[in-house]
Amino acid sequence: MSAVGPALRARLGAYFAVDDAWDRGNPAVATRDVVTGAAFEVAGIVTLELARSAGAFDSVDAPWWVIYLVMSAAALALVLRRRYPLAVAVYLSTHMFVTGVAMPQVMAQVALQICYFMGLFSAMAWGRSRRSALLVTSTILVFMLCWVAWQFAVGQSAQTWLDSTGEDERFGFLPPVPAIILLTFIVNVVYFVGAIIGGQVAWNGARQREALAEQARTITRQTATLQQRAVVDERLRIARELHDVVGHHVSVIGVQAAGARRVLHHDPQTAAGALGAIEASSREAVSQMRSLLGTLRDIEERSADEPITDRSRTSTPGVADLEELVASRAYDGLRTSYAVVEDRPGAAARLPETVGLTLYRTAQEALANVVRHSTASSASVRLRVTEAGERPFAEVEVLDDGRPRAGTSSSGMGHLGIRERVASHRGEVEIGPRTTRGYRVRARLPLGGTGD
């Protein structure tokens, strides 16, 4: 039995959160508080008038305006129930005691009982300190129950006197007066305890909502950090690829310029060819540089211990490597297919290097997601190149027939990298489930003037 007491106290302390330092705060009086007080005032006046008209206050000596004033003094106090919850609870409890002693018929009216309940409820729901709120409400509970117990004792004495004079009779197991007072005692226990527990439930609900909101804010901050890091990492990778591409073109220009200088006087035709190659290479380098530099703005941080992975400087993958990439993914029950659609023969081979690299990376990431996160049994990759028309484009589309695999999740960084790469060419991306079944990743890049 000795362990029951501490265990019960621990459970009650945990339920009432006596050691929780969270402060719900007491908001300033707002429109909702004024509306609440006004609503209780109107409802109280109406119900009191109905009760007075029904003769419920015949034994009350006070004039009618005093009864209404008592009602108003309780209802209007609810305006401050959130701002000063403990003070309002003490005030309304005192109001209840004084009115119950002076005018018990008025105190017993439903409108006033609801006001008293709301006062005790608000003390637990809005009390800033759990210990103070529990102390105040417990004191009120004990005082009110002692008052009812005193009435029971007085009632028992009255019943004894009535029995001795023979002026009363029993209708049940208990005499009438003690029965009425005992019933009142039970009702008050349910009434007060219900207000206290209800207020604590409201406080616990507010605490849980705040905790969930804080978790949501934390997740949002972490997501933003991860997205920013993914953007930075992707830009750094693109910067490395830009370095490789520009370095290649500059090397070509240097070699061609040296050759043209040597044969300029005795072989003008060969020199002219070298100069033409220099011109083409420089235009290509400038176009690619402009398209890639757009994604390298606003890099705010770089972690020295985060490696930047890239492919070999001497071998940048492109659309020519797509067939090998697709074939390499055909394993573990996954069937893959690859097709090229060109409006002109050799159009795919004429794609700029950076365009080919972006299309390759898009297909690579999409196929990797199929293997990691999908139940697909087949995947297809289609490369489309259109050079004719007003809007020539190159497009890669990856389709699969699967559904998301249970137990896997994606951070979304791969999709973010795809969007960053395609955005550097002012292209468009479509990523999402198909209307029938499976998933689609499609990246379309405009050709010609991407850097203008």
Image (cartoon, rainbow, N blue to C red):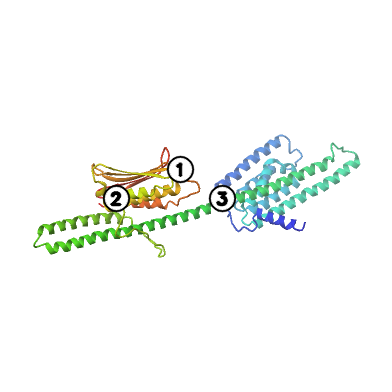
Structural distance between the alpha carbons of marks 1 and 3: 34 Å
Can you identify the residue that label 2 sits on? 320
Q: Nearer the viewer, residue 132 or 440?
A: 440
Q: Can residue 102 be seen from the camera position used here?
A: yes
For badge 3, the amino acid type reads: Arg
> Mark 1 to mark 2: distance in Å?
30 Å
Q: x, y percentage for residue 40? A: 63, 42
- 3 vs 2, front mark: 2
Q: Amino acid at mark 1?
A: Arg
Above or below residue 255? Residue 113 is above
The x and y percentages for residue 20 are 62, 57
Contact (CB < 8 A) between labels 1 and 2?
no
Judged from the image, the secondary structure of the residue bearing numbered disc 2 is helix
Task: From this view, report whether residue 194 is shown above or below residue 293.
Answer: above
Name the residue that disc number 1 marks.
Answer: 403
Picture coordinates of residue 78, whole percent (x, y): 62, 48
Q: Earlier in the sequence, mark 1 or mark 2?
A: 2
Asked whether residue 81 appears in the rendered view, the answer is no
Mark 3 burial class by Cα count in 10 Å: few <14, some 14-19, many 20+? few
The residue that label 3 is drawn on is: 209
